[in-house]
Image (cartoon, rainbow, N blue to C red):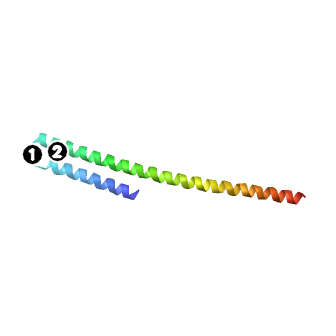
């Protein structure tokens, strides 16, 4: 999670830097507004891409965790069945 926060911080700082740089450039207002719009679109696309990558990595991690959980569940279920079988045997032997 720290990596994603750092990445978002860097992208945000880069976007702010680009906007501030364009605002202080000695050009006509129409050119400046177009540059801001273009940079905003670029940053937005980059952010969407990074967010999709992050969500994709969460999905992969989630799949791994689910598979691991299923394996542990099946192992526990097998152990409980064996314990029940052992207890039945013990009860049967105790009553005979």
Q: How many labels sit on residues? A: 2
Residue 63: image location, x then y, percent: 50, 51
Q: Which mark is residue 57?
A: none
- Identify the residue at image location x=28%, y=45%: 45
Nearer to me, 7 or 19: 7
- Identify the residue at image location x=33%, y=46%: 48
Q: Quadrant of residue 68?
A: bottom right
Q: Is residue 17 left or right of residue 76?
A: left
Residue 33: image location, x then y, percent: 16, 41
Image quadrant in which the C terminus is located: bottom right
Q: Is residue 62 left or right of residue 89?
A: left
Q: Dot 2 surroundings within 10 Å: few (below 14), some, or many (20 or more)?
A: some
Residue 5: image location, x then y, percent: 36, 55
Image quadrant in which the N terminus is located: bottom left
Nearer to me, 26 or 71: 71
Rounded to the nearest angstrom, the CA distance separating label 1 from label 2 is 10 Å
Q: Are marks 1 and 2 in contact (CB under 8 Å)?
A: yes
Residue under pointer 1: 27
Q: Is residue 37 left or right of residue 4?
A: left
Secondary element under disc 1, as helix, strand or loop, is: loop
Q: Dot 1 surroundings within 10 Å: few (below 14), some, or many (20 or more)?
A: few
Which residue sits furthest top?
A: 30
- Identify the residue at image location x=20%, y=42%: 37
Residue under pointer 2: 35
Reading the chain from its start, which is encountered first: label 1 or label 2? 1
- Identify the residue at image location x=82%, y=59%: 90
């Amino acid at each position: 999670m720290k990596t994603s926060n750092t990445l978002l911080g860097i992208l945000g700082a880069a976007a702010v830097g680009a906007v501030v740089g364009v605002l202080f450039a000695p050009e006509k207002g129409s050119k400046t507004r177009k540059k801001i719009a273009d940079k905003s679109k670029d940053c937005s696309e980059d952010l969407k891409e990074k967010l999709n990558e992050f969500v994709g990595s969460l999905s992969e991690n989630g799949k791994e965790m689910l598979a691991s959980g299923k394996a542990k569940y099946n192992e526990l279920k097998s152990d409980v069945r064996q314990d029940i079988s052992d207890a039945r045997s013990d009860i049967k032997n105790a009553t005979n």
